[in-house]
Image (spheres, helix red, strand yellow):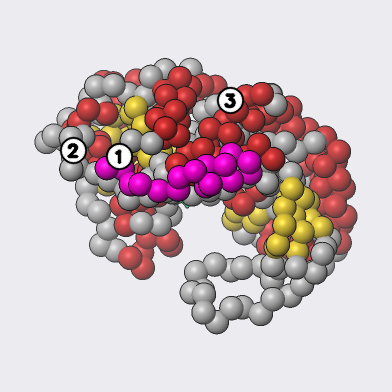
Amino acid sequence: MTVAAPPAALMQTYRRWPVEFVEGRGCTLVDAGGKRYLDLVAGLAVASAGHCHPRVTEAIAAQARRLVHVSNLYLTEPAQRLSARLAGLTGGMQSFFCTSGAEAVECALKLARRHGGQARAIVATDGGFHGRTLGALSVTGQPAKRAPFEPLVGDVTHVPFGDADALAAALGPGTAAVNLEPIQGEAGVVVPPPGYLQSVRALCDQNGALLVLDEVQTGVGRTGAWFAYEHEDVRPDVLCVAKGLAGGLPIGACLAVPGVAEAFVPGDHGSTFGGGPVAAAAALAVLDVIEEEGLRDRARDAGLRLLAGLGRIWPDGEVRGRGLLVGVTLPRAAARAVAALALQRGLLVNDAAPDVLRVCPPLVVTDDEIDAALETLEEVWDEIRET
Ligand code: PLP
């Protein structure tokens, strides 16, 4: 492993690992010293089609040769095709394109207030993560991330995730929207009890509040369906998507059902780079790859193999998740130590919380790669449990 010194000119907002990557293909990354790594992080659930999938790379290159940017003052073909494609996947939702997950959430919050009129309040969940901008941070339910930046956007209440009674008590005629993830990713892959999302949907309907689902992490095939809400047979009013959509190029999308989307009028919202031709072309290629290579089924099957294998290594841990968004709780706060030792042995996994490992590989991951990763994790744990 090449050990890079912390670069003095970069702000220290991340606890970066001392490794510099220079190449990637599928689930393999190569560092500056030529060492190969098996990547079960996928750039934080982004490289859905694998690193540098030839179809995606070619779509990016071809579009970059043709047209890169004109702004949203004008139409471009890739953005129109992508909005039509997403409408097809979501039963007719309309898209607003932006460049990140946080920006998609910002759009959703503004849309909810525009639609809500006098109803301004937003209800979100403890532990939920929605991004680092001030609006997205306001609905994020993690006090340590919020406290240094308060005061945040007002009229936001947090309730325990998975508790429909607590949500019912928090809702009222002043509620514009309920905003939550179907599975909390950054919190350590927290899955709500069965039926919870359906109860949330019913409570939103009873109170005239919009249901905003943040599928920035769970969307675009990661859980074995295009969107995690499909597993629960629930339809949101507003849907936030980003991460895996363009396989690594910056993109975000806030989608809304007809009747809600029209609450925005020209001038209400915008994003200079949103849905630019290159990112949109990449997204169209990623969606084609997911469809044509059967990657939703792959995510489901590979996820089951991963869950079973992690359960064998940590029989007393809680192994949870859906498809290729998987977490395992460790008996103590050893996730960083496991990730560090795994990195030394050429395996990337993520310490989502001090005692939770998160595994979210590219959706193209093979059974052999999963087995190899499990073998490494077992060796790593054998070494660490002794210390
Ligand atoms: N929402 C969810 C559920 C996320 O997991 C994330 C990032 O991890 C975000 C929003 C923020 O996305 P971004 O980092 O692209 O702003």
Tell me the distance, in whole angstroms, between the alpha carbons under discs 3 and 1: 33 Å
Residue drawn where x is 82% and y is 42% of the image: 369
| Callout in the foreground (2, 1) | 1
Height in image: 274 above or below 170? below
Residue 310 drawn at (x, y percent): 77, 42
Tell me the distance, in whole angstroms, between the alpha carbons under discs 2 and 1: 13 Å
Residue 51 drawn at (x, y percent): 68, 47
Tell me the distance, in whole angstroms, between the alpha carbons under discs 3 and 2: 33 Å
Give, as a three-letter code, the residue at label 2: Pro
- 5 in the magenta segment: no
Give, as a three-letter code, the residue at label 3: Ala
Residue drawn where x is 62% and y is 24% of the image: 291
N-term mark: 3 or 1: 1
Task: Indicate left or right for 118 with 230 as reference.
Answer: left
- Work out which quarter of the rendered image holds the C terminus and state it: bottom right
| Callout in the foreground (3, 2) | 2
Residue 317 seen = no
Q: Residue furthest bottom?
A: 8
Task: Indicate left or right for 167 with 193 as reference.
Answer: left
**SS for dot 1:** loop
Quickly name the residue at label 3.
Answer: 225
